[in-house]
Amino acid sequence: MRIEVKNVTFFYGQGLPWEKKALDNVSLMIEEGEFVGLIGETGSGKSTLVQLLNGLLKPYSGEVLIDGVNIFKDRSILSKVRFNIGLIFQFPEQQLFAETVFDDVAFGPRNLGLEPEEVAHRVEEALLKVGLNPIYFGSRSPFSLSGGEKRLVAIAGVLAIKPKVLILDEPTAGLDPKGKKEILARLQLLHKKEKATILMVTHDMDEVATLAEKIYILKEGRVALWGKPEEVFSQPELLEALGLSLPSLPKLLFSLKQCGFNLPTAVFDLKEASRLIKEELSRASG
Amino acid sequence: MPLAEVVTIGQYVPGNSFLHRMDPRVKLLISLFFLVLLFFENKICGYLFFLLILFVLVKASGISLKYLFKGLRPILFLILFTLVAQGLFSGEGRILFSWGIVTVSDIGVWKAFFMSMRLAMLVFVTTLLTLVTSPIDLTDGMDRMLSFLAYLRFPIHEIAMMMTIALRFIPTLLDETDKIIKAQISRGAPLDRGNIFKRLKALISVFIPLFVSAFRRADELAQAMESRCYKGGVGRTRMKEMKLSWLDLGGTLISLAIGGCALLFNFLPYWFL
């Protein structure tokens, strides 16, 4: 499934005293099986853009195409799109409502009108995908879980619909380092093993640097920069001008480079970076 | 469209017009004065005069008329209902037209016009008041005006504080509802499609998270107030003291003059409408 956003512009509060242009002529492309990162400061239009992708908001001008079809063409396309694109909002644990974890995760599949056996099967599968044991967690109340577990349940609730594209709006916000790691590892597994197409919104550079294959940077409602991580993060001056910082490894390498060492900056693997630094040091001293 | 854009009543639009700068107590009293006057008005030209005054005030406040009219939308049904009920079913006075249970009489038409006019103006005046006065100022004003009730052991400060908090949280909860609705629609909840029973059932998935978060917010707010040693009204001082200014005096005098003029219309001969 390929998502294409073409020259989209969107306003909040159109015609009201506080009218605000949230997106300004934005275009982007997500190919099937790709892991795309969307970065930007608070208020840069990330969350708005994400809500356009499954038709929750309608653009003022421009098009959202899925496999070449405009999703706003008619209602039947729109409701199909909702099941094909799994959108996980910021702090998704705030949407849990059912009495048990099982029922909550089953909400999506039941809305699809599936048979009870198929629903049960999908719930089990989705819980396993996020690393929660269905036998242990299934019958518990979602409100009795820890913050990290709640979020995993909420993600499972979207996975159970079996969307073709997964969109996550800051999936790690407000979690402790362990919870963050857990979620990112699950996402990577989904991408690698299931070939899932994923769009992840974040303002954490380190997260996208290691996971994403393509990065879009939004600034004040416009795409300021996009490309492969190697390309994007090899332009530290430009990033700085955009008010963004480099991920931690490239940052280190960039400051070493400024001290006169001959090193590349777009390296995201710790082992690779240490090897390069060691080589350069021995070359410099030798 | 986000919910907060549909509901405009109780919304405050910041600005710096003289309407914004007036003392909330004076604004409250003047609004009340106008509302009472509305019910004494019995000439069409009196209402037109009121409309003119309101128009001038809205222009002066810098708020777009379009936005003010949006506030009228939720009660449009009520106004239409009044218009129809009064206009078509009251048999008082000279009957102009009759068909089955429908009887149109001259007094009926007259009453229909006045009742719907009053309702609409009522909403206009109160909406304008809330558009130019921040909720905090409004409840503070009420608190000050009614503070004598505290001598009668009536917890006026506590009630004003509760109102402030309630008003403050309307937009927050609207935003939250909006977000939860979107999230559940994304999970395929039949909130925007299917028959009425399906939609109602799906609302459970919106209300439970909403209540959970409202309680969580209430709890956090209570803790935050406690940690700032809030203990109610007794002996509490204010950061912003309210002071009456020449602007307030001028506003009051002009309003009284306008009120007098409006009442004068009532003494015009009947053929003047």
Image: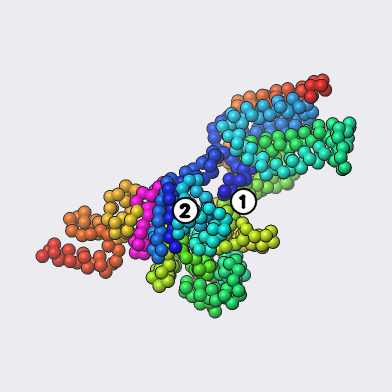
Magenta span covers which residues?
Answer: A202-225
| Residue at (63, 49) in percent of width and height | B166
Q: Which residue type does callout 1 highlight?
A: Lys
Q: Nearer the viewer, residue B160 or B129?
A: B129
- On what subunit does the disc labeled 1 rest? B
Image location (x, y in percent) of residue B79: 74, 40
Residue B217: % across, % down? 58, 56
Determine which residue is flagged by label 2.
A64
Residue topped by disc 1 = B231
Q: Is residue B195 above or below residue A121?
A: above
Name above or below for residue A11 compared with residue A101. above
Q: Is residue A277 above or below residue A237?
A: below
Mark 2 residue type: Val
Q: Residue at x 74, y 34 (%)?
A: B117
Residue at image position (37%, 53%) is: A217
- Residue under the point 86% across and 35% down: B97
Res. B75 image quadrant:
top right
Residue B129: name its quadrant.
Answer: top right
Q: Secondary structure at mark 2?
A: strand
Q: Is residue A94 visible?
A: no
